[in-house]
Image (cartoon, rainbow, N blue to C red):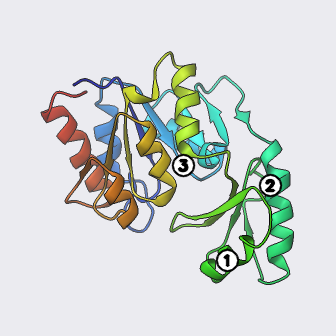
Amino acid sequence: MKFRAIVIDIDGTITCEKRELHLGAVRKIRSLKVPVVLATGNTLCYARTASKLIGLDGAVIAENGGALTIRYDLNGIFDEESLEECEKAFSFLSEHFKLTKLDPLYRRTEIALQRDFDLEKARALLATQHFDVEMVDTKYAIHLKSTRINKGIGLRKIAGMMGLKAGDFVAIGDSENDLEMFEASGFGIAVGNGDERIKETAHHVTKASFGDGAIEALEFLEEKSWI
């Protein structure tokens, strides 16, 4: 079994517990002989900056699949039509909760919210409406996003742009917004600090957490000669 590329989450996966970039994970990623795509719920500019700092080619999946690019010299591709529905859902929920948007000037396909309200109550209220949106908790923000967008769909799109298939990728992550990415990929690895749902979906779970878990995951793949 051979895989041709890696897609890896950023926050909680190649960071330390306090969200600093894990330098050991960075060194390990730099040593790989296969392409590495960063996948995040964060903004495109954040993802591109992380890619640049790590020393990668700029292929990123941002905003949970709503924003993509494969090189630094190319403009991003955005599914901007989804934002209108998210804004309608935000207006509805704002009648019941005090909500704080995160990075509203930079997000073009979804709305990220501060994690200071009752998520389950908000989900229940949202279910009474007919918005084509969902709320996903990444442990760093609550993402109000279209059901048509996720990291798995983003992976399929960016794989095609790179001349690959989603099944050619190993996916590494820690959170519920990585679920569809795991399902689309050929093999999924959850780091030790991952949510229970992502661990259940994963083909392999590391003993170590955060960036140490990412290193363990990549070494596991090398030991198996899968990359």
Is residue 155 in view? yes
Residue 116 seen in this snapshot: no
Sooner in the amino-acid sequence: mark 1 or mark 2: 2
Q: Measuring from the top left, give residue 221's x and y in whole percent.
A: 21, 36
Is 14 situated above or below 29? below
Percent across and percent down for residue 51 are 51, 38
In the rendered structure, the answer to whether residue 126 lies left or right of residue 29 reads right
Residue at 58 percent across and 37 percent down: it is 154
The residue carrying mark 2 is 105
Foreground mark, 1 or 2, reads: 1
For label 1, the SS is helix
Q: Which mark is residue 124?
A: 1
Vertical position of residue 116 compared to residue 81: above or below? below
Q: Residues within 10 Å of mark 2 (few under 14, many from 20)?
A: few
* Three-letter amino acid code at the position of disc 2: Leu
> Which quadrant of the figure contains the N terminus?
top left
User: Which image quarter is the C terminus in?
Assistant: top left
Q: What distance separates the C-alpha of mark 3 from that of mark 2?
A: 17 Å
